[in-house]
Image (cartoon, rainbow, N blue to C red):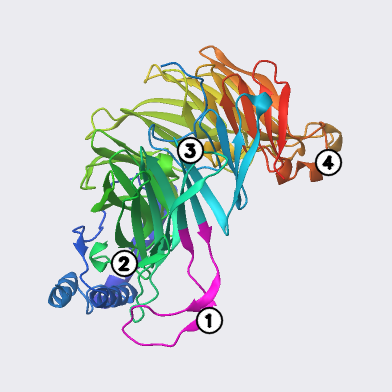
């Protein structure tokens, strides 16, 4: 009996799907590199709002169509747009930053004599040293939320975010529409003050741009702001208003870079540079679906956003990257690229010797199954991938990354914590040199003594059933990485039980390291399990009750780590949960000489680093 050709093909197709699914479930495919289709990476510039509106309309249509080939092609977009175009000093702490010499905004800063701290919409200027004479000398109040501050000699830089109800008017549009009431777009404002007389700060410049704050950095006398502004639609394209000291400046369409990549939505990402001494200002911008994470070196700003590549069999993740060259006041969007997978945070990225390194986790799905792999990529300054290390720790996810010179440190986790040491001395051929598996995980890695790292994370107990682990107390580990092939956990310290927390897990600025004294300081909330509530040993999923919040001080040597002191803004141990509220919680610590300054919503307190005795408490009322 003959089987019709159509039926034969259908049978073959069905059997292929069945056997393919069975093989996938029995033995998931080994991760293989794939060619990432990132589209045309050539950067272009708009010459008018009309051209930009036309471009967005075409790209949205292309994105929403079933297949790019039906109607809109790269060549069509190009053609259409071409036709349209025409001595020894007192040691004091600085903010814990990723790149030395590239400052990051924070809610507290010191210059060794004064402390500047943010509480809600107020900025306190406090005479700090000597501590016996400390006190508030001025309070600046703002109409909006203070995002962060910089201090540079006699200059104070304040970032303010605001969002309000207003009448919104189309400023540049293809169609005329009437103004309508609604929530106005958010604004980011930078205030620059002369603080040569701390008791009387003088406002020198204000710069406001419509849009949302993404990030900022300061290098020498230059402040760099990254903000993004939502493009409404192709029929009502508006550009953000820039205001400098109450004078409105038109946004220049020629300062907008773009690539031939279709998105459903667009953000205008703007990089503003300000010289805080002579008040010079420059900016450059590009179209992007969003701006989520930034990394800044001394030469470049990298802006990233997550993206997805959809197909019939697989949904693959990727991270898109723009590189913006910075040199003093000059900013210039120069390159665009992408890598497979998603990044964890800013520490997933690094620049070294004119190469950009980035670590990602991919969640890959296919035939209703999914698995994760972890990758490290090396890109050149054109953001082309030139080196890759893929398929690390299948089934796990990246929990922390740190690049230091030629070496990358990557922590993944599922049930145990593998610390991978990656040799990047040959950028074209990165390789794993060493690996260490220990219980728990590290969410943040910090270099201390040469050849040693501190890891801050959680202790963990593998679940008896299921492929996961139960997080426990805060874990601080000391790793020796002097031998790249054989990393060692020299010592570890676990604080509290399940339910204990520290802001260092998600905000590296909460950690302070005093290298001259080998002291590590971090705020913690300690939770302790009451064993009387359980018959026998408490289960690993049991949560402890919060009993203490404050700052722990840990001594770090090559031989180990030791808890040597603690400071709290709360009077007694075992206080009620209501007393463990945010206003009593220490959020930052700074040091000046032999004194440590701790900051909560209620107080700035000064303690001795020698015996941890309270010297002074300054109410922040």
Q: Secondary structure at mark 3?
A: loop
Residue to which mark 2 is pinned: 251
Does 606 appear above or below 166?
above
Q: CA distance from mark 4 to mark 2?
A: 54 Å
**Quarter holding residue 358:** top left
Asked whether residue 463 is in view, the answer is no
Circle on res. 576: 4
Q: Nearer the viewer, mark 3 or mark 2?
A: 3
Q: Circle 4: is it few (<14), some (14-19), or many (20+) Cα within 10 Å?
A: few
Q: Residue at x 20, y 47 (%)?
A: 382
Residue to which mark 1 is pinned: 181
Q: Mark 4 or mark 2, which has the lower sequence index?
A: 2
Q: Is residue 185 magenta?
A: yes
Q: CA distance from mark 4 to mark 1?
A: 47 Å
Q: Is residue 161 left or right of residue 26?
A: right
Point out the image quarter for the N terminus.
bottom left
Q: Secondary structure at mark 4?
A: loop
Q: Mark 4 or mark 3, which has the lower sequence index?
A: 3
Q: Nearer the viewer, mark 4 or mark 3?
A: 3
Whole-percent x, y for residue 584 in the image: 73, 41
Does 527 appear above or below 187?
above
Labels in figure, total: 4
Whole-percent x, y for residue 140 in the image: 59, 49
Residue to which mark 3 is pinned: 196
């Amino acid at each position: 009996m003959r089987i019709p050709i159509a039926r034969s093909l259908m049978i073959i197709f069905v059997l292929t799907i069945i056997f393919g699914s069975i093989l996938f479930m029995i033995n998931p495919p080994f991760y293989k590199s794939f060619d990432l289709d990132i589209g045309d990476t050539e950067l272009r510039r708009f010459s008018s709002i009309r051209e930009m509106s036309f471009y967005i309309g075409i790209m949205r249509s292309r994105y929403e169509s079933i297949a790019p080939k039906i109607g809109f092609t790269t060549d069509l977009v190009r053609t259409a747009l071409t036709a349209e175009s025409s001595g020894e000093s007192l040691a004091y702490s600085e903010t814990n930053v990723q790149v030395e010499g590239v400052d990051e905004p924070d809610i507290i800063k010191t210059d060794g004599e004064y402390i500047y701290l943010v509480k809600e919409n107020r900025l306190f200027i406090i005479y700090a040293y000597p501590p016996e004479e400390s006190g508030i000398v001025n309070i600046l109040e703002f109409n909006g939320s203070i995002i962060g501050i910089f201090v540079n000699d006699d200059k104070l830089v304040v970032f303010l975010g605001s969002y309000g109800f207003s009448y919104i008017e189309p400023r540049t549009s293809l169609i005329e529409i009437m103004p309508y009431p609604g929530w106005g777009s958010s604004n980011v404002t930078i205030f620059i003050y002369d603080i040569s007389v701390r008791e009387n700060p003088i406002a020198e410049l204000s710069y406001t741009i419509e849009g949302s704050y993404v990030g900022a950095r300061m290098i020498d006398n230059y402040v760099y702001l990254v903000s993004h502004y939502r493009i409404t639609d192709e029929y009502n394209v508006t550009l953000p208003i820039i205001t400098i000291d109450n004078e409105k400046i038109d946004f220049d369409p020629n300062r907008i870079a773009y690539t031939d990549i279709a998105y459903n939505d667009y953000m205008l990402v703007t990089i503003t540079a300000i010289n805080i001494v002579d008040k010079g200002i420059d900016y450059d911008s590009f179209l992007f679906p969003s701006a989520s994470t930034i990394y800044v070196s001394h030469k470049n700003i990298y802006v990233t956003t997550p993206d997805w590549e959809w197909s019939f069999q697989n949904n693959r993740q990727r991270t898109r990257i723009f590189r913006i060259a910075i040199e003093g006041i000059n900013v210039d969007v120069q390159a665009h690229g992408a890598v497979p997978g998603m990044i964890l945070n800013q520490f997933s990225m690094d620049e070294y010797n004119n190469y950009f390194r980035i670590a990602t986790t991919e969640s890959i799905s296919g035939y209703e199954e999914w698995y994760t792999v972890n990758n490290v990529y090396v890109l050149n300054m054109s953001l082309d991938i030139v080196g890759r290390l893929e398929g690390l720790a299948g089934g796990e996810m990246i929990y922390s990354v740190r690049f230091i010179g030629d070496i990358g440190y990557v922590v993944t986790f599922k049930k145990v914590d593998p610390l991978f040491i990656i040799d990047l001395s040959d950028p074209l051929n990165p390789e794993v040199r060493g690996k260490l598996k220990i219980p728990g995980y590290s969410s943040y890695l910090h270099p201390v003594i040469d050849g040693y790292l501190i890891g801050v994370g959680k202790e963990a107990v593998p679940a008896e059933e299921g492929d996961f682990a139960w997080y426990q107390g805060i874990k601080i580990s000391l790793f020796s990485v002097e031998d790249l092939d054989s990393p060692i956990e020299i010592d570890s310290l676990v604080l509290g039980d399940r339910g204990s927390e520290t802001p260092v897990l998600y905000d590296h600025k909460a950690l302070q390291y005093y290298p001259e004294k080998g002291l590590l300081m971090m705020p913690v909330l300690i939770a302790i399990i009451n064993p009387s509530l359980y018959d026998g040993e408490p289960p690993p999923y049991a949560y402890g009750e919060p009993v203490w919040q404050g700052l722990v001080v840990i001594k770090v040597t090559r031989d180990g780590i030791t808890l040597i002191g603690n400071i709290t803004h709360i009077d007694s141990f075992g206080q009620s949960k209501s007393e463990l509220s945010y206003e009593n919680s220490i959020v930052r610590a700074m040091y000046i000489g032999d004194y440590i300054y701790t900051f909560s919503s209620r107080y700035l307190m000064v303690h001795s680093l020698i015996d941890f005795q309270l010297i002074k408490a300054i109410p922040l009322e």
